[in-house]
Image (cartoon, helix red, strand yellow):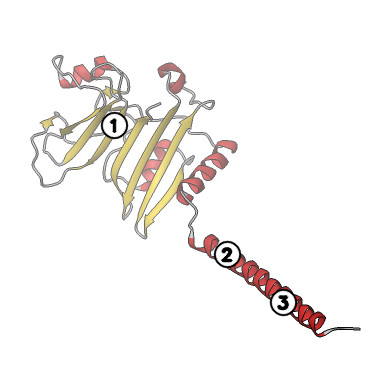
Amino acid sequence: MTTQTDIKMKKLLLAILTISLLTNCNNSQTKSVDKSDRLELVPEPDKELREEYEKQQELNKSNCSFIDPDTSVVGIKIKNVESTLNILGKQTKLEGDSTHVFYSSDKKQKLGLTVHPGDYYSQVSIFNISYSDNSKQNFRQIKSKEFETEKGIKLGISKREIIEKLGSCYLAKDSTGNSIVLNYRIELPNDSKTKLLKRNNMPIYFATYKLTNDKLENIEFGFEYP
């Protein structure tokens, strides 16, 4: 025979069970929503760098090889102290861990010469060529109206002219509708026919050419700091 107490206990247990089921259901929904929100709100870090890396790896796996890189500007050769002193003078002393800037003879262009930390004085590893601004800083001038590379690349030329001189084994990066950057690269174990990396004991050579309205406005090439 069921007593009044038994009925009350059954109702209490039913109520506890119902509350427990509702609570678990709500927690499950909350966790699902929280996880979904987290995935939507948190962006993938360094997505652009990852995509560039993947494109470079695809290029490396292809039969396309950058084999004829630029290695000098107005007679200053990469990693060659003697050539630097021949152009800039025997008393020149470009310190390491620094970029040293020079004007062209008419001050319309700038040449940046970077010496890596630990390298000899005046041993240039990276060249950067750009148009000068109107700041009129007290940079030393070099007796060249234009800063031209050994391959004949200079500011103002077109994309077609760059490709004719360096080949089509590059990655292109668009920054705006009328701007593009061509990226050339050599890295171990791949090397150029000239064995540039092996001879200089360096792991990576890079070259970037930025154009706006199909006119070259910035050149940078050399060895990445290992």
Mark 2: amino acid: Ser
Q: Identify the image quadrant of residue 152.
A: top left
Mark 1: amino acid: Phe
How crowded pointer 1 is (Cα within 10 Å; few <14, some 14-19, many 20+) is rated as: many
Q: Is residue 142 left or right of residue 81?
A: left
Pick the quarter of the image with the C terminus: top left
Task: Give the numbered dot on residue 127.
Answer: 1
Task: Give the numbered dot on residue 36.
Answer: 2
Q: Identify the image quadrant of residue 88.
A: top left
Q: Is residue 52 left or right of residue 78?
A: right
Q: Is residue 151 above or below residue 51?
A: above
Residue annotated with mark 3:
18
Residue 178 in view, yes or no = yes
| Point 17% across, 18% down: residue | 93
Of labels 1 and 2, the one closer to you: 2
Real-space Cα distance between discs 3 and 1? Answer: 74 Å
Pick the quarter of the image with the N terminus: bottom right
| Point 30% across, 39% down: residue | 219
Q: Is residue 223 above or below residue 81?
A: below
Q: Are marks 1 and 2 in contact (CB under 8 Å)?
A: no
